[in-house]
Image: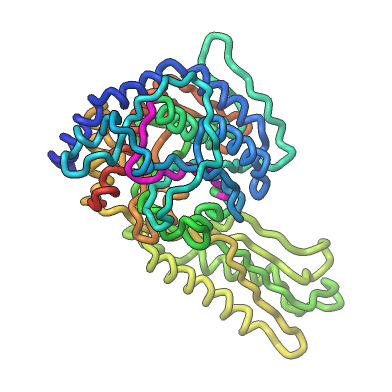
Amino acid sequence: MPATASAQRRISRLATLTAVHRAFHWLHLHQPQLRQWQLELVRIPAPPFGESARAAWFLERFQTLGLTNLHLDDAGNALAELQPEPASTSSPTSASLNNVISTEAADSLTVRRAVERPPHFAEPANASPISSQAQPCILLSAHLDTVFPANTPIHPTEEKDSPRIHAPGICDNAAGLTALLAIAAALRFANITPPIPILFAANVGEEGVGDLRGMRHLFERGPYRTRIAAALILEGGGTAAAIHRALGSLRFRVTITGPGGHSWADAGTPNPILLLSQALTEIAALTLPTDPLTTLNVGHISGGTSINSIPESASALLDLRSTDSTQLLATATLVHQIFDHIVTTQSTINTPLKLHIDTIGNRPAATLPDDSPLLHTLRAVDRHLSLRTELRLGSTDANIPLSRGIPALALGSGGIGGGIHTLQEWYDPTARETALHRILLTLLDTTQLLAEGDL
């Protein structure tokens, strides 16, 4: 579906504004600074449930950039805001970007005619928040965590005749985190004041067993939960891709326990490993739908103590995925029934068996509608930048807002990467600038839509 004519006109006008060009100019001149930020932050370990040092680093950067309302929330997310111009202090000489975009909502997006700041600048970061705590905001986020355990050596290496950087986590998600800082810095340098607050979040818990815990907190328990009206998630490299469909997943740890015993003396006692294997054989024979596409994987099996012992327990880790939440739940129910039937029929008074199924991951499936104004904005931005929009399915932090009916996209942060989730991970920032333009234009237009009640 192409961008609407109105979206195309908005983006064309937005891209001509002096303030936007100032932001683009900052991004162009400070590519070395972005590289330095990326090298610095990737050296800070951020294993699952161990992101605190990197979060603290981000709060320092947010403060240096002059953002306000800096804090770590209860989940460990590093948060800061870029706030609208207070009505009582608006300068009569302020030029309204929105006068160019829409004459019906003047003064909602402004450029303060202030003295130009150097690349590193700061204002009091503890400025008073705007009076209306109910005012909607837009979220711009990137996840802090990596898949690598705490003891993983991280020593970035740079190629002599190439812009490539090699390091675990350098692309996923040091690239996204760098883009988060870049957008904040460009907005501050250009003195752009949005019509509604922009919430910058370096969030925890996206990878693996983190189960999107940082994003869940923001949308389910945190103080912004009723205020975030749209979200842009910065994820890894790439320029033209956008994830608009959230792949759902359910993850389980299944454990069967029994009395155990000696392989000869207690022969005939139910064997948890064999029972687990029997259940998994039945599960492997299931015919899963291709529409909606649904998959099932057994990623790990454990149990037993020795070759001549009947094990007391056996466990397996299962990963179920589907593009449809209803189908995902139906498949999970069927899997549960298979385990329950096998354990129930083999358990006796003398040799009792127990079944434990623990949910260790739950990522909801959802889709951003094709007619969403946010998608119209993205397509218009891509057309302006001569990009071909690549809409994709994925499992990202965007799952949470999308599942709650909140418009959201996960966007690439530019450049290219490879070896993701391996020790050989690499990132090449070439052409990162185009992706940052894409993010900035999408962000600014979306804030305007929200301010006018059109999203």
Question: Which residue is at 28% across, 23% downward?
Answer: 18
Q: Nearer the viewer, residue 11 or 277?
A: 11
Location of residue 88 in the rendering, given as x and y in whole percent from the top left corner? 36, 43
Residue 396 visible in the picture: no
Give the vertical position of 90 relative to 34 (above or below).
below
Q: Is residue 445 left or right of residue 198?
A: left
Query: Is 197 colored magenta in this rendering?
Result: yes
In the picture as drawn, the residue positioned furthest to the left comes out as 5
Q: Nearer the viewer, residue 296 or 226?
A: 226
Q: Is residue 169 left or right of residue 384?
A: right
Question: Which residue is at 74% across, 38% downward?
Answer: 151
Residue 117 visible in the picture: yes
Q: Is residue 441 left or right of residue 247?
A: left
Q: Quadrant of residue 426?
A: top right
Q: Quadrant of residue 385?
A: top left
In the picture as drawn, the residue positioned furthest to the top comes out as 161
Query: Is 47 colored magenta in this rendering?
Result: no
> Which quarter of the rendered picture does the N terminus lie within?
top left
Location of residue 344 in the rendering, given as x and y in whole percent from the top left corner? 62, 83
Which segment did they paint magenta?
Answer: 190-205
